[in-house]
Image: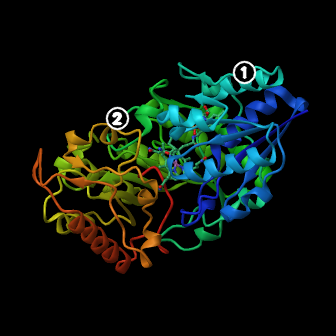
Amino acid sequence: MLRIGFIFPSSEYLYDPFKGDPHTHFQILTVLENAFGGAVSLSLVDLRGIKREFAIYHIPECDLYLHSVYTLDYEEQASIVRALRKNYPKAKHLAGGPHASIFEEEARKLFDSLVIGEGENSIVQAVKDVMSGSLKAVYRQTEAVDINRYPYPLRKFLPASSIARRGMLTLNNKPGFDKLLGTTVMFSRGCPYSCDFCAMPQIKAAGPGIRYRSPELVEEEMAYLKREYHLDGVSLLDEIGIPPGKAKASRFLEAMGRTGMYWRAQCRVDGISPEIARLAAQAKCIALGMGVESVWQKSLDSINKRIDVETAKRTIGLLKEAGIEVRIYMIAGLPGEPEDIVERTWRFIEETGPDMVLLSLFTVRPGTEIFNHPGKFGIKNLTTDWDKTRNMYGRYSKETPVLNFEYEAETPWGKSLSNETIIANYLELQSRLNRKRLGTVPPGDTNCASG
Ligand code: B12
């Protein structure tokens, strides 16, 4: 029997790594179970919360190790691979994920094999090849997979205690929801937009656009979670949780409504009509997070966000009226910010009254248009020291944040802000938010779709 272990790294830089779930791992292991049944033994090696130097004691001997490589985890994952090669020299290491796709050459030196693009077909072929001793260096998926051909991802690879958790449905302005049991789900793949600060367009180049699981599969997965884990609700991690377009959105919302479970999600500010807001509330949507990113239109335009500040204002109002808690994601330090950005941002917040504001410091991540063409955005001195890109507010009670780039003094939009000013602006806004209890309490929410 072939022993396969999929390793999830410690994620020690996250305030709480158990806010999310290893969806890639659930999905790939479920696909393998369906394809190979008893011919393979499958394990998810969960290293969250485990110190790096002790990780090796938590990893059982396997014939094939799988890794999903994120930029911030790369160094840790490389050290794990090196340690495992010493202990189990015959074992093979196969990797996929954003960092492995963006830095293919570098990744090929570390791993025996890479899966580039979506992995459902490639992993089945790769495991067959391991069995016959002919593992290839690269498996490349060049077309989008049909996600409705695959069953929902099973959660049994982790203990129930780490699946069903309290605190997943907590609301800032309504008590009681923190007691509910919840977990995270993902019902879509991809995104139809090309924001210049997001790595998705490059990572998902082989499957552009957005694909949703059918409402039937959504209901099946929700029923499974309720039955096996007695959940009260779920948090959707999809970038655009409610499918765009009235017909698709209604069918999805009706399906969610039938489950009787609470849910929270994310959406674009331009994706919500009054009717959709009402239907979502009826379907027990308790909170929606939206990437407002900036209150300065020039900054929004410079990153190709394709929204406008007025729409953002309107949608916040709509959702509040429907009784849905509104969280907005904002970024400090985007290209084009004026000198008075703090006051402008604060006015917007006071005027619109969101229930929560999750503010991040702008970080240039690999795989983004800004990383690939910094000059276009007036950016220089980009660092690839990824440690400097672990920007979580939760860290800053003890440390001072740093930017992983600088703006040219003169940029395409005129005079720029210095790094010191951007950081001071960021800290000033965070402290105002905390004083008004609008920030994350405790600081450092790990939600990642906001960048
Ligand atoms: C859910 C999610 C999370 C979850 C769970 C992460 C996980 N490791 O499972 C949480 C909340 C924990 C998280 C955290 C972070 N995330 Co995140 N996350 C996502 C999100 C929204 C979905 C990923 C997902 O699970 N999709 C569902 C699965 C089934 O699909 P998939 O991941 O695309 O995987 C498919 C293929 O890529 C491939 N594949 C991938 N890996 C592997 C490995 C093997 C062996 C094989 C065979 C195949 C394979 O096969 C899969 C099936 O086709 C993506 C954006 C997106 N929509 O893709 C961002 C994204 C991946 N995250 C990102 C970032 C930056 C982060 C954070 C660093 C955030 C931060 N605030 O700093 C942290 C770091 C996390 C860590 N250690 O996990 C970036 C990655 C950029 C990069 N260069 O690494 C993305 C692309 C967001 C973005 N817009 O830029 N994240």
Residue 366, x across and y down, in percent: 41, 43
Q: Residue at x 76, y 56 (%)?
A: 56
Residue wearing tag 2: 194
Mark 1 Cα within 10 Å, few/some/many (few <14, many 20+)? some
Q: Nearer the viewer, mark 2 or mark 1?
A: 1
Q: Quadrant of ligand 1?
A: top right
Determine the secondary structure under disc 1. Answer: helix
Q: Does residue 409 appear to the left or right of 320 in the view shown?
A: left
Amino acid residing under circle 2: Ser
The numbered dot on residue 211 is none
Checking the image for residue 125, the label placed there is 1
The image's colouring method is rainbow
Quick one: quadrant of the N terminus?
Answer: top right
Q: Is residue 53 left or right of residue 416?
A: right
Residue at the outermost bottom position: 435
Q: Earlier in the sequence, mark 2 or mark 1?
A: 1
Q: CA distance from mark 2 to mark 1?
A: 31 Å
Residue 87 placement (x, y as % from top left): 80, 48
